[in-house]
Image (cartoon, grey):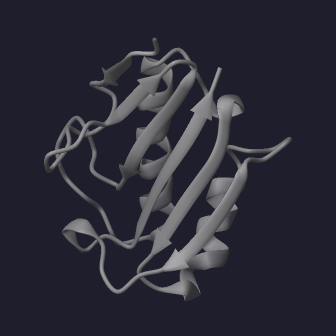
Amino acid sequence: MLMKSVINSLNAPAPIGPYSQAIMYGDMLFVSGQIAIDPETGNIDTTSIKAETEMVMKNLKGVLNEAGMDFSNVLKCSIFLSDMSSFSEVNDVYGKYFTTNPPARETVAVKTLPKHVNVEISCIAGK
């Protein structure tokens, strides 16, 4: 019988609600949406969409690493944007983390995101 286990990394921000950073189920990892909260300071810098996206990707990396994975294990990402006009800049940063065999993905515009950030990204990974 497969067991689920909670993954919690100090290299990503603590959850801001009743959820886990990630859940491992068998060889599958389900990573909750990450926003640009700096895990060391708790601050959010939304002055640049590129810098904001970099922090999101660093937070995803922290959770993946805690589970013994990296971006090569990512099968699917979901990107949520507060403004679709940021798509190109977010895509530029995101693309640096998936240079070969990128995962499946969708990108959607939403009305608002937690803490009024501009980008949130979640992913599913497998070993």
Give the x, y percent position of residue 45. 29, 62
Q: How many marks?
A: 0
In the image, taking residue 115 as reference, residue 60 lies left or right, namely: right
Q: Residue at x 64, y 55 (%)?
A: 94
Give the x, y percent position of residue 78. 55, 59
Q: Looking at the rendering, which quadrant does residue 90 occupy?
A: bottom right
Give the x, y percent position of residue 19. 22, 43
Work out which quarter of the rendered image holds the C terminus and state it: top right
Give the x, y percent position of residue 34. 38, 50
Furthest residue toward right:
100
Q: Residue at x 54, y 77 (%)?
A: 108
In the image, taking residue 49 as reference, residue 41 lies left or right, namely: left
User: Is the residue 15 above or below the residue 90 in the image?
Assistant: above
User: Is the residue 14 above or below the residue 115 in the image?
Assistant: above
Pick the front one: 2 or 106: 2
Q: Residue at x 46, y 24 (%)?
A: 25
Pick the front one: 58 or 51: 58
In the image, taking residue 84 as reference, residue 98 lies left or right, namely: right
User: Is the residue 22 above or below the residue 93 in the image?
Assistant: above
Q: Residue at x 33, y 69 (%)?
A: 46
Pick the front one: 106 or 2: 2
User: Is the residue 94 above or below the residue 102 in the image?
Assistant: below
